[in-house]
Amino acid sequence: MQNVLLIGGGGYIGSVLAEVLLKAGHTVRLYDRFFFGKNIFKDLEQTGNLTLVQGDNRGAQPDLFKGIDAVMDLAGISNDPACDLDAKITEDVNFRGSSHTAKLAKAAGVPRYIYSSSCSIYGHGSSSSLDESSEMAPVSLYARMKIATEAALRELQDENFSVTMMRNATVYGLSRRMRFDLVINIMTLHAYKNRKIYIVGGGKQWRPLIHVRDVSRAFQAVMEAPREKVAGEAFNVGSNDQNFQVFQVAQMVRDVVPNTDVIVVPDDPDKRTYNVEFSKISRTLDYKTVTSPYEGIVEIKQALERGLVDDVIQTRTVEFYRYLLEAQKVLNEVCLDGKIF
C-alpha cells in the first residue's frame, strides 16, 4: 500500500484514477479546486482511504505532501480552447503551478513524481510512429506549457526524486467527471442525440486514442515499477493499434450508432496530427491497453440510453470555464462586502 497524492484529481482522468488506486489497495489524498463538485466521490469517501482537500496548485502548502509516497500531477486547464481563454491563467496554472508542487514534493522527501503530459506536444508530426525521442512541434499554448513543465521537472530529477512524464494519447470513455469535448465522446453524443457526426479540420488528421481506465492503469504501473525503469523517463501512453484518423473514428461511431450522417464541416485543416509509437511503455513495463475504441463507444452509448450521463454544461470544459469567468464578473459587480444579499 502506498499513500498517493492526486493533484488535479477531481477531473476527467483523476476521478477514474482515484478509483483504480483505491481498488488496488492504496490510500489517496485528492487535491483539487472541485469545479465539478465533490459529490461524485461520495461513495469512494466511504471506503475510508480517500481524503478530499480543496485547493489550487499555485497555492499548495508543504503540509499537503506529508506522508506521501508518490505524487500524480494531473492539474491544469485541460484542453486547447480552454487554455486560449486566458493565456496568463494557463501559464500560471499549467506551468508555474506544476513547477511549484513538484518543488514542494521534492523538499518534503516524496520519492516519486508522475506528471500527466500529452502526445499533443508532438503537434504537427512530421512523420508517423512518433516516439519519445521525436521532435516536438507544438501548435497550441496547452502543448507548449506541457513541454515547459516537462523541462522544469527534469531539472528537479535526482537520485532521491524520481520524475516520470506520461504523454497521454487522446482519452475517451466514461468518467465520474464526464467530458463531451473529446473526439470519441463528443462524436458518440452527437450520433446518439442527433444522428449526426461532425468532422472538422478535414478528418485526415491522426489521433492516438486510449481509454481513461487504461490511462489510469499506466499511472499505477509507473508508480509500482522499479525506480530504475521509470526515473527521468517519458512514456507515450497508449497502444500502436489505436492510432486512427478522425474520419475513421467517425466510421467506428457510425458502426455502433447506425443511421447516422457524417458531416464534414468546412474548416481550416487541423494543424494537430500525430501518429504515435507506444512500444516503449509496453517493452519497459509490460503494459498493454485492454479497452478498444469500439468498447468505449458502446459504453458511452449505453450510459446515455440508461440516463447515467447527461449532456450538461459541466461536460463541455471550455464552455463551462467561460461560464464561470462570466459569472465571476457579474458577482464582482453586484457583491457588497463579499455578499449578494
Image (spheres, rainbow, N blue to C red):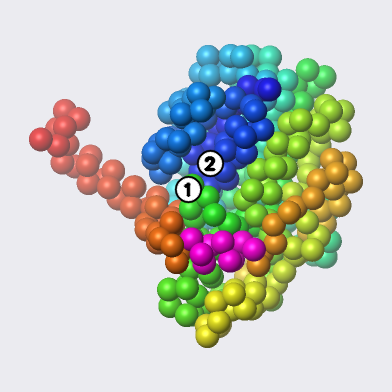
Could you tell me which residue is drawn at 70 percent across and 72 percent down? 245
Residue that lies at the very extreme toward the right in this rendered image: 283
Secondary structure at badge 1 equals loop
Kindly identify which residue carries mark 2. 15
> For residue 254, what is the image quadrant?
bottom right
Q: Quarter holding the C terminus?
A: top left
Image point (86%, 33%), residue name: 229
Mark 1 surroundings: few (<14), some (14-19) or many (≥20) residues within 10 A: some
Residue lying at 77% horizontally and 26% vertically, measured from the top left: 162
With respect to residue 88, does 298 lie above or below?
below
Q: State the extent of the magenta-drawn residues as a range.
A: 295-303
How far is mark 1 from mark 2, CA to CA? 7 Å
Horizontally, is 87 left or right of 211 in the view?
left
Residue 180, percent from left and from top: 49, 60
Secondary-structure class at tag 2: helix
How far from the left and from the top, in percent, is residue 23? 62, 34
On the image, the x and y values in percent for residue 280 come to 86, 47
Magenta stretch, main secondary structure, is helix
Percent position of residue 250, x then y: 61, 75
Q: Inspect the magenta stretch and tell me whether residue 296 lies in it.
A: yes
Viewer-closest of 22 and 224: 22
> Which image quadrant is residue 126 in?
bottom right
User: Which residue is denoted by mark 1 in the rendering?
Assistant: 177
Q: Which amino acid does label 1 sit on?
A: Arg
User: Which amino acid, by three-letter code, is at mark 2?
Assistant: Ser
The reply to whether residue 248 is in sight is yes
**Above or below 101: residue 82:** below
Q: Residues within 10 Å of mark 2 (few under 14, many from 20)?
A: many
Q: In this view, does 282 lie to the left or right of 150?
A: right
Of residues 157 and 114, the one nearer the viewer is 114
